[in-house]
Image (cartoon, grey):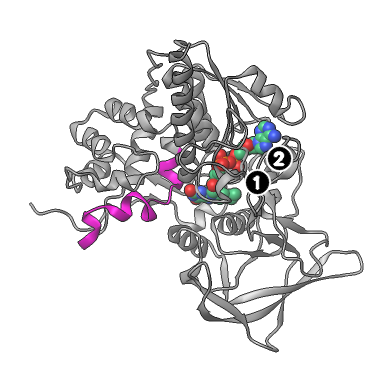
Amino acid sequence: MGIKKERMPVKKRSAVERKKDFKEVSSGYDYKSALAEANRCMKCPNKPCVEGCPVGIDIPEFIKSIIDGDLKEGFNTLLKSNALPGVCGRVCPQEDQCAALCVMGKKFEPINIGILERYISDTAVEKDFKPQKSKKFGRYKKSIGVVGSGPAGLTIAGDMLKYGYKVTLYEALHEPGGVLRYGIPEFRLPNETVDREVENLNAMGLDLKLNYVIGKILSVEELLEKHDAVFLGIGAGLPRFMGIPGENLNGVYSANEYLTRNNLMRSYRYPEYNTPVKKGKSVAVVGGGNVAMDSARTAIRLGAENVYNIYRRSRVEMPARSEEIENAVEEGVRLKLLRNPVKIIGDENKRIKKIRSIKMKLGEPDESGRRRPLEIPDSEYNIDVDVVVMAIGTGPNRLLLDVVGNLELNQWGYIKTDKETGMTNIDRLYAGGDIVTGAATVISAMGTARKAGKAIRRELENDRQNK
Ligand SMILES: Cc1cc2nc3c(=O)[nH]c(=O)nc-3n(C[C@H](O)[C@H](O)[C@H](O)COP(=O)(O)OP(=O)(O)OC[C@H]3O[C@@H](n4cnc5c(N)ncnc54)[C@H](O)[C@@H]3O)c2cc1C
């Protein structure tokens, strides 16, 4: 029997059904499909796919465990290099990472690595596999303070626990996970998945302190006195706006606020939960990334009759994962491509009535490599809307950065670190994730944290040997 050229299809709920609720869209693979997909893997001895993974998961090894029927072993293989397999299996852009280097992909469809990863981690939940506590746990008295429980913070916490250090993780919000919790909606990443992966870290000995705003309750200087090294993984969630007239009208949200109200504060269940959100009959979401897709699909689920996604380039340039654009369109989101808002128009009560956009065309590539959008003169037109969500990117939040004396930042206001070690200019202070790179991806945040963890370990071991 020859190798199957196409991937095993992934089951997802119909658009008609799924747009009525916030439950997960895709149900991943069952045993039969996972086995068939795993059997497509060519088991390349040089494992190019692993090169494409910023945290170096041994992909062929965990795929082999599916073929061998030893999913517990597969789960352990995943946990060796990834504290968040259920998360990565759902939201990691594999098409640009591991799967982009899959040899199968040269001629046929690459192996569906993410969905196989998800299959193992979901089976681990179903069968209640527990992570093995590191034999080294508690070996060292030295401790690490981690600020922020997004993917960067959770990754370094897991790594340092495995190395045998004590770890205290300080999170400002009342629930852990960072963007995984308050940004990415339940229909793509259920909170249960995040809970489970945090529980695994708790079981490994993590000391998690919630409602703990560093910079207010304790300063970074105080943390450096308490711990032998400190890692800042505080994300970059400060919303950006366009600076156009009307952005202060009632019903204009940043995507960050809109999604946080829904995901963290459960406003879709208002008044059972006490945070409201304006539902809107017609909603415009501005931007072309995952955040824009998540906001538009949230608006659909909140019951909007018309949801317009306004983006200034064409579909090819949209930074969102293509499967999420497809899902959004299936659910009824109307793409308004090559359009850019110039004004939001309100009534005398400061309520939104319309959004005014100008048509665009693409010019020569700009510094990002994408073709530059150019305005078409005299092409403005209005769409009737009552809610506008701005999903055009985020920047660094200065709340903590401004109170750390002498911390060096780069020209965009992100923390300046050594690329290989995550070291800042302050002794024993490290940083990683979006607060260093600018808004990026889950796996890149995890990759920077992994590097910082290795560097901290080297430093602490040197200290020990020199004593
Ligand atoms: C809506 C949305 C959808 C996305 N979709 C995808 C996707 O599909 N795939 C993908 O790979 N990436 C996606 N991303 C990007 C990805 O989620 C981020 O790149 C990633 O979460 C960054 O991780 P981080 O650990 O650096 O920061 P974050 O996840 O932002 O976590 C930072 C944490 O630090 C805490 N914190 C901040 N300041 C303090 C303080 N002073 N004291 C204590 N705690 C503090 C915050 O509360 C937060 O919990 C998405 C992002 C958004 C917003």
Image region (quadrant) for ligand 1: top right
- Relative to 281, residue 12 above or below: above
Q: Assign a secondary structure to mark 2.
A: helix
Residue at 45% over, 35% down? 450
Q: Earlier in the sequence, mark 2 or mark 1?
A: 2
Give neighbour class at mark 2: few <14, some 14-19, many 20+ (Cα, 10 Å): many
Q: Which x, y percent locates residue 28?
A: 37, 45
Q: Assign a secondary structure to mark 1.
A: loop
Q: Which amino acid, mark 2? A: Leu
* Residue that lies at the very extreme toward the front in this rendered image: 466
- Residue 401, numbered circle: 2
* Residue that lies at the very extreme toward the right in this rendered image: 348
- Does the magenta portion include 421? no
Q: Which amino acid, mark 1? A: Leu
Q: Which x, y percent locates residue 356?
A: 73, 76
- Residue 112, numbered circle: none
- Residue 172 visible to the viewer: no
Task: Report the magenta stretch's main SS.
Answer: helix
Q: Which x, y percent locates residue 108?
A: 22, 60
- Relative to 105, residue 357 above or below: below
Give neighbour class at mark 1: few <14, some 14-19, many 20+ (Cα, 10 Å): some
Q: Which x, y percent locates residue 346?
A: 84, 69
In this figure, which residue is indicated by the disc labeled 1? 409
Please report the bounds of the magenta region as a residue range: 87-108
